[in-house]
Amino acid sequence: MVGSQPRDGRVLISLGFVSIAILFLIYSRLGNAEITPGAVPMLERIGMAFYLLLLVALGAISYGLYQYHRQKITSGQNDVFSIIASITWNKKSRRILCITAIAYGLFFSLTSGILVYQPDVVFSQHYGVQVPSAFIAPCCDDIGYVPKFIFYITDHVGLQVIPINLILQLSVSYLVGLNMAIAANAFSILKKRAGVGSIAAITGLFIACPTCAGTFVSLFMSASGAVAFTLAITHLQTVFIAVTIPLLIATPIIMAKRIKNSGWSCKIES
């Protein structure tokens, strides 16, 4: 609308992240309480409500990012975030961002154990479940790892959604897509920095589930080597999280600063 300034979206983004933190804390208290057989159905209903509220919070963050992006486009400022918004606003950049984020998200799903493919196991026989079917596993694990959503799609393909894995997958996939969209538009300027985003993307594979990453590596290693690698990665999980996401956030800022200093400008497609 002409003459009106779009909302910057920061309130929605903050509200979404705060809501997710509160959800995790509340459910951790419920999940760590003594569970009796009679309480399981109630916890399953709470688990379904948890995922519904989690999706609402993620939707708020997504829409807040869109509002912030659009506000930076219309503000006419020349800061690094406005440059990032300008570079990624055109159709080509949005296509690159979406394709890269989806492709990386699928790869992340396979390596982190969210998307499970076991050609040698028949789920209906091995686990005694109906295919297709879905259920909530309400307990019991560390904060962020419950409730789990299990979906048996076929006898060999399934989904195992863990809250913290889901959030990390969406976050890392979006940031990888953002890095690729910026680099595709300014590769000649930023070629010295191109490797930074790639290193962060590879490291991000090991954030969600290091023990699952060990399974992936075991294809190329001996059994004893894979176990040792898995244990090592598990202990380094905090390091991977601490390094990867800040690196993926910092890379677009570095690239935008270099674009700004170069005097290069881009036109926004209407």
Image (cartoon, rainbow, N blue to C red):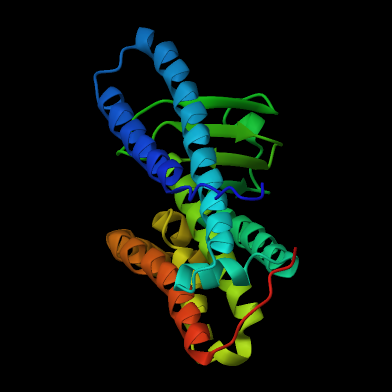
Q: Is residue 187 above or below residue 48?
A: below
Question: Which of the pair 128/239 is nearer the observer?
Answer: 239
Q: Which residue lies furthest to the front in this view?
A: 3
**Residue lying at 69% horizontally and 28% vertically, measured from the top left:** 131
Which quadrant holds residue 127?
Answer: top right
Q: Position of residue 185 (x, y in %)?
A: 65, 79
Does 59 sit left or right of 96 as displayed? left
Residue 256 percent location from the top left of the image: 49, 78
Q: Quadrant of residue 33?
A: top left
Q: Nearer the viewer, residue 223 or 19?
A: 19
Answer with left or right where residue 99 lies relative to residue 221: right
**Residue 108, visible in the rendered structure:** no
> Image height check: is 231 above or below 125?
below
Q: Residue 180, percent across and down? A: 60, 73
Can you see residue 135?
A: yes
- In the rendered image, the quadrant that contains the C terminus is bottom right
Q: x%, y% of residue 21?
A: 33, 39
Residue drawn at 27 percent across, 61 percent down: 235
Q: Nearer the viewer, residue 100 or 152?
A: 100
Using the image, determine if residue 20 lies above or below residue 31.
below
Query: Image point 63% across, 40% down: which residue?
Result: 158
Taking the image as shown, residue 67 lies to the left or right of residue 130, namely left
Which residue: 51% across, 47% down? 7
Q: How many labels does the image show?
A: 0
Q: Which residue lies furthest to the top in this view?
A: 38
Q: Nearer the viewer, residue 260 or 117?
A: 260
